[in-house]
Image (tube, rainbow, N blue to C red):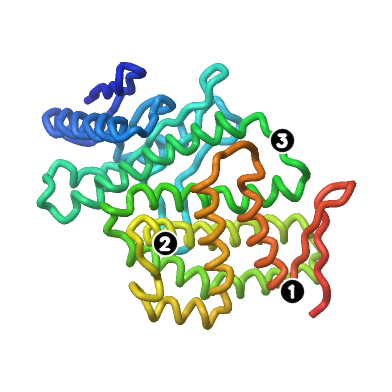
Amino acid sequence: MTANASCAESFDTQVSVSGFSQEDGTKLANLIADVIKNVCSEGIDLSALEGVTVTPNYQEALAQFNSGLPTPRTPTVEEFANGRAMAVRCKRGDRFKSHLFLDTDIVSPLLLGETDPGWKLASNVLIHELVHVYDADRIGRDLANEPFTNDLTGWLFLITNATWSEYYACLLTAETDPSLDDYVTIFLSAVEQYPRAIREQIIAYRSHADIQLLMDFVKDKVASLFKFAGYVLGNLDGTGRQLELTHPSAWQTIQDADFSDFWLELQAALREMNSQPWRDISIYDALGRVAIRYLNSEGMFPRDESQGLYVEIPAR
């Protein structure tokens, strides 16, 4: 079952739905197309949206998708959350686009109507992913030809890009997003476990001496930690709230974990990114500085040298 969504006559995108009866599949495809049109009407440019696929075989669909890029996308699998929706970057000729994949379970409540408790979450997931389409296209247009100044800058971008991406998507959807409690729970799990895991890997590195193994581990863990913070901070900023008031016990946990200063620095950096014009890759510098300070606090001191990225890890 398919439907087409057209936004201001600038583009058409096909919505393909499987796993439903003919009637329900057509209805769901049309509902999704209507959401796309409504998002466009709010001034969000979705011209980079190639298409939408709703499928009960989410993992297989991602694995089989021809993105035109060298690295295939796989479902997000975190220790605390598994993804069931993804805006996948793809390349068609010289243009970067996005294709949206949605698991049937996550969007099927759209069929139940606005009075159903699951409808609000399903609607927000869809809009959240559409914001990713817009944001990825904006980054591609504004920053694609901007070289990283050095290897350290590129490595920090890999750590912090998802922080901005999730912050921005949650910021724009905050008024309709019922998931703040879940975001907070996921972040607290990460802040309680990831710093310890990083320290354990640093100790292990002193035995195996594989710096690439350590750097890859640290990159992934810090990127996830900051990304989970981005979810919470985006929702809070989008609704004008503060964590210490909405979740005082969570804020105390963050303070006890010695992360409160980094939390406030992340918030300031993300707000600055949202308020400034995006002229070049330096828009990420403030987030990168927070990442550097966090790594320093864990005993890692990365810096750029003439031969590339160098990391000093003093004995502690």
Which of the 4 image quarters holds residue 251?
Answer: bottom left
> Which residue is denoted by mark 2 in the rendering?
232
Q: Quadrant of the C terminus?
A: bottom right
Please report the residue visible at 31 percent of the width from the left and 16 percent of the height from the top.
Answer: 9
Residue 1, above or below 127: above
Q: Earlier in the sequence, mark 1 or mark 2?
A: 1
Please report the residue visible at 50 percent of the width from the left and 76 percent of the height from the top.
Answer: 254
Please report the residue visible at 61 percent of the width from the left and 45 percent of the height from the top.
Answer: 283
Q: Quadrant of the N terminus?
A: top left
> Which residue is denoted by mark 3 in the rendering?
147
Residue 160, above or below 242: above
Question: Element under label 3?
Answer: loop
Q: Earlier in the sequence, mark 1 or mark 3?
A: 3
x and y percent of residue 18 in the render? 25, 32
* Count of numbered labels shown in the rendering: 3
Type of amino acid at the residue the image marks with label 2:
Val
Single out the residue that lies furthest toward the right: 306
Question: Element under label 1?
Answer: helix
Type of amino acid at the residue the image marks with label 3:
Pro
How far, Cα to Cα, is label 2 from label 3? 30 Å
> Which residue is denoted by mark 1 in the rendering?
203
Q: Are marks 1 and 2 in contact (CB under 8 Å)?
A: no
Please report the residue visible at 49 percent of the width from the left and 48 percent of the height from the top.
Answer: 274
x and y percent of residue 232 in the render? 42, 62
Which of the labelled discs sits on residue 27, or is there none?
Answer: none
Q: Residues within 10 Å of mark 2 (few under 14, many from 20)?
A: many
Question: Element under label 2?
Answer: helix
Which of pointers 1 and 3 indicates the residue nearer the eye? 3
Q: Are marks 1 and 3 in contact (CB under 8 Å)?
A: no
Single out the residue that lies furthest toward the front: 276
How far, Cα to Cα, is label 1 from label 2? 31 Å
